[in-house]
Amino acid sequence: MEPARSIGKLGFRRWYERRLIEGHAWLVSCFLCALAIAASLEGFSFKRPESLLILGFVFVAGLVCWHALKRYREIMDEAERLGEQSTCSSCRAYGAFNVIGE
């Protein structure tokens, strides 16, 4: 129901553009978390007193990275699924339709 409401409000082209931007923002977040994990584990040693804190950070960053990658994939799948249906078969116009119901 949410895509229909958003598409009806913004129009398909603007909705599609915003979904792609949001999806890629999640991908960048995933990449930054993975980079933070790699940087944290670079000098990791169990001999240091802050090793538990570093492992906690790595765990939380891993969860955020996993969630961001999952959201990216969901958004891209939704945009691809609806983007495939956005061209009129008779006149070949792209995104030129009105939402009449959810």
Image (tube, rainbow, N blue to C red):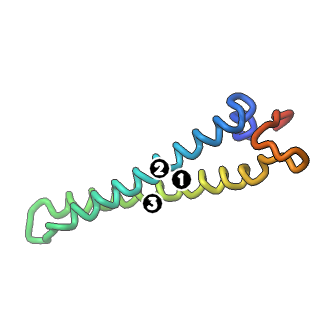
Answer few, some or many: residues within 10 Å of disc 2's Cα (few below 14, many 20 plus, some between 14 and 19): many
Q: Kindly state the secondary structure of the residue where label 3 is placed.
A: helix
Sequence-earlier tag: 3 or 1: 3
Query: 17 or 54, which lies in front?
Result: 17
| Residue 33: x %, y % from top left | 34, 56
Q: Secondary structure at mark 2?
A: helix
In the rendered image, which quarter contains the C terminus? top right
Instruction: Quickly name the residue at label 1.
Output: 71
Question: Percent position (x, y) of residue 81?
Answer: 72, 55
Of badges 2 and 3, the one in the foreground is 2
Crowd tier of the residue under label 3, counting other residues whose Cα lies within 10 Å: few below 14, some 14–19, many 20 or above: some
Query: According to the image, label 2 marks what residue?
Result: 26
Q: Amino acid at mark 2?
A: Trp
Image coordinates for residue 28, horizontal then vertical, percent: 41, 51
Residue occupying image coordinates x 27% and y 56%: 57
Please state which of residues 97 and 28 is positioned toward the viewer in this rendering. Answer: 97
Q: Residues within 10 Å of mark 1 (few under 14, many from 20)?
A: some
Work out which quarter of the rendered image holds the N terminus and state it. top right
Give the amino acid at mark 1: Arg
Q: Report, in whole angstroms, how far the alpha carbon at label 3 lies from the one at label 1.
A: 9 Å
- Mark 1 vs mark 2, CA separation in Å: 7 Å
Check if mark 1's residue and mark 2's residue have beta carbons within 8 Å: yes
Residue matched to label 3: 66
Three-letter code for the amino acid on which mark 3 is drawn: Trp
Q: Residue lying farthest bottom? A: 46
